[in-house]
Image: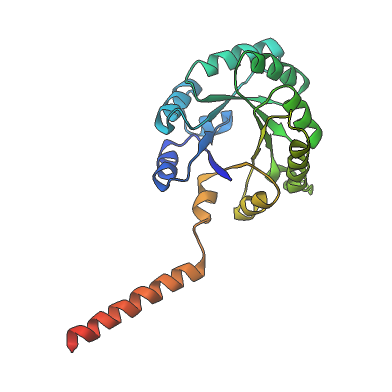
Amino acid sequence: MKFFLDTANVEQIKQGLAWGLCDGVTTNPTLVAREGREMEEAIREICELVGPDRPVSAEVLAVDHDGMVEEAQERASWAENVVVKIPVIPEGVRAMKTCSDMGITINATLVFSCGQALLAAKAGARYLSPFVGRQDDIGWSGMEVVRQIATMLRMYDALDAEIILASARHVGHVIEGTQCGAHICTMPFKVLDQLFKHPLTDVGLERFLSDYRAMQEELGEA
């Protein structure tokens, strides 16, 4: 599974890169606004930071076909690794088809059903982003949707897309995603950081170091 960071915070991205655990970045208007920045400025900096081999998703704001296509062309011009996020609404799916025919890489966002993912994949979207946490919030199984999409993609080679497990709220979402066919998980930095943590690791490390220090002290006294 590839790890994307769902953030527009440059320092978080730098840390993910330093760990060797950032394969790409996803943003949305909320995340960019949270950093107090203009979208173009933020996306250009992130793209330069991660390099051309790591995709960076930038979302359109328009909700009509022509507006989405125009914004998609603009965002794609910012850097070669920009992926344009378009919502799975009727005008959005139409725009996905237009943009994919133009060679623009598309991330279909706000996916909540296998049917929506099917429409987006048929329209040429390269990435399908089912929002798991938001479905869990209303009592639906977000992971079941991921499983359905993964099964669909395995059955139809013509649907050339990857699943980005989105709206990952905790480590459990990431781990379960590895079991149900998600190719990528995009997560907040805090979730990536939590993957490191286990109390037995901390206890075990302290025990190893303590035992070694004690042995060194005994040798020094001998």
| Position in image of residue 94 (x %, y %) | 74, 16
Residue 88 visible from this viewpoint: no
In this picture, residue 140 sits left or right of residue 208: right
Camera-side residue of 108 and 152: 152
Residue 60 visible from this viewpoint: yes
Considering only vertical position in the picture, is 80 above or below 198? above
Colour scheme of this structure image? rainbow
Q: Which part of the image, by quadrant, shows the C terminus? A: bottom left
Considering only vertical position in the picture, is 198 above or below 157? below
In this picture, residue 170 sits left or right of residue 117: left
| Position in image of residue 163 (x %, y %) | 66, 38
| Position in image of residue 201 (x %, y %) | 47, 68
What is the total number of numbered labels drawn onto the structure image?
0
Q: Which part of the image, by quadrant, shows the N terminus? A: top right
| Position in image of residue 210 (x %, y %) | 34, 77
Camera-side residue of 37 and 107: 107
Residue displayed at 75% across by 24% down: 122
Residue displayed at 77% across by 42% down: 151
In this picture, residue 5 sits left or right of residue 207: right
Residue displayed at 77% across by 33% down: 156
Q: Residue furthest front?
A: 157
Considering only vertical position in the picture, is 149 above or below 172? above
Q: Residue furthest right?
A: 115
